[in-house]
Image (spheres, helix red, strand yellow):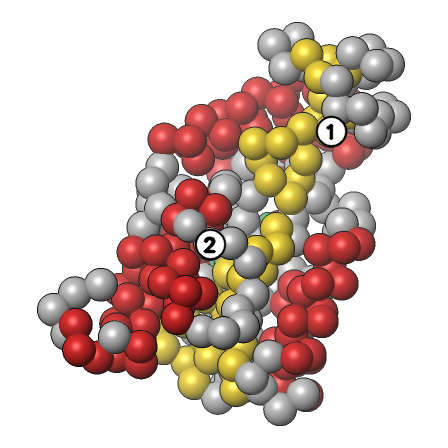
């Protein structure tokens, strides 16, 4: 099982959240942009911000880190990727077995009534069923995670033999608790992060460096020794 965070998309040019100066939360106030209250107060401000992030994500390309995880999935009998990222880059990299724990920025929901019809007028940003506002289908602060996604992530972490924690600061729960479930069930915990985190001292292995450089090497060395040339 691999849990990924914003760090794996950093080499695709997408800002992380908490990296000093460059992180989104160093420039923008999450309580003004990533809560239901913020959307209620100013739906245009929030929608514009997500439109800007959506554009960034569409312009970005999956990097060697995303591609290496897609390759890992092809090389092992059972694999699950759980991502906190809403950018859709893992899917574009070819990963199939995936859980988007915090939703997906390219999808929408009806804010007022969560109309299941999904009969949406994206241009007007309105739900055709009830006339309500459209919001991005992502998990905002203070909101519950999608039940199915969380259950799949917990099940995966409790059944895996190897748990990778990649490009995440391990501070946002419940995602930040998955490694502990894996460890408690006997899994080997491997962290990949350019900086040390709260998990570093607790992981069995912690590789310091960029995911887009370490993951291809790891996949090559473990699964494709004969192709030392390249992944
Ligand atoms: N390779 C590996 N790790 C990296 C790289 C890289 N190229 N670049 C940055 N990192 C690491 C940083 O050191 C940091 O530990 O990625 C981590 C990114 O952490 P955050 O910005 O906190 O992002 P994340 O852990 O995904 O945040 C969790 O918080 O804001 C909410 O919903 C949002 O899903 C997000 C959640």
Q: Residue at x 65, y 74 (%)?
A: 157
Residue beneath the point at 68% across and 88% down: 184
Can see residue 15? Answer: no
What is the tally of numbered marks visible in this picture? 2
Please tell me the numbered disc located at residue 96: none
Residue at disc 1, secondary structure: strand
Residue beneath disc 1: 109
The tag earlier along the polypeptide, 2 or 1, is 2
**As displayed, is residue 189 above or below residue 130?**
below
Q: Residue at x 86, y 14 (%)?
A: 130
Q: CA distance from mark 2 to mark 1?
A: 24 Å
Does residue 61 show up? yes
Q: Is the CB of the residue bearing disc 1 within 8 angstroms of ligand 1? A: no
Q: Quadrant of the N terminus?
A: bottom right
Q: Nearer the viewer, residue 125 or 221?
A: 221
Which one is in front in this view, the residue at disc 2 or the one at disc 1? 2
Where in the figure is residue 47, as x and y percent of width and height? 62, 22
In this rendering, would 68 be left or right of 160?
left
Q: How many C-alpha atoms fall within 10 Å of the one at disc 1: few (<14), some, or many (≥20)? A: many
Name the image quarter holding residue 198: bottom right
Is residue 87 depicted above or below 42 in this figure?
A: below
- Find the residue positioned furthest to the front: 77
**The quadrant where residue 196 appears:** bottom left
Q: Secondary structure at mark 2?
A: loop
Front-lying residue, 164 or 16: 164
Against 159, is 167 above or below?
A: above
Which residue was labeled with disc 2?
A: 95
User: Which residue of the protein is positioned furthest toward the bottom in this rendering?
Assistant: 186
């Amino acid at each position: 099982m691999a849990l990924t965070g914003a760090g794996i998309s950093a080499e695709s040019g997408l800002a992380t959240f908490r990296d000093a100066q460059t992180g989104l939360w160093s420039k923008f106030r999450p309580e003004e942009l990533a809560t239901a209250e913020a959307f209620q107060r100013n739906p245009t401000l929030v929608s514009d911000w997500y439109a800007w992030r959506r554009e960034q994500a569409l312009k970005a390309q999956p990097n060697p880190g995303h591609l290496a995880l897609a390759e890992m999935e092809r090389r092992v009998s059972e694999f699950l990727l759980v991502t906190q990222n809403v950018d859709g880059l893992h899917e574009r990299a070819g990963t199939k077995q995936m859980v988007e724990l915090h939703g997906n920025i390219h999808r929408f929901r009806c804010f007022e009534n969560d109309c299941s019809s999904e009969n949406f007028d994206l241009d007007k940003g309105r739900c055709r069923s009830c006339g309500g506002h459209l919001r991005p289908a992502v998990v905002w602060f203070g909101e519950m995670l999608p039940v199915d996604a969380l259950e799949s992530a917990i099940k995966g972490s409790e059944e895996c033999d190897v748990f990778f924690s990649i490009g995440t600061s391990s501070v946002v729960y419940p995602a930040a608790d998955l490694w502990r479930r894996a460890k408690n069930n006997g899994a080997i915990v491997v962290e990949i992060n350019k900086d040390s985190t709260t998990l570093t001292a607790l992981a069995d292995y912690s590789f310091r460096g960029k995911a887009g450089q370490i993951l291809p090497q790891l996949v090559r060395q473990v699964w494709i020794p004969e192709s030392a040339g390249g992944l």
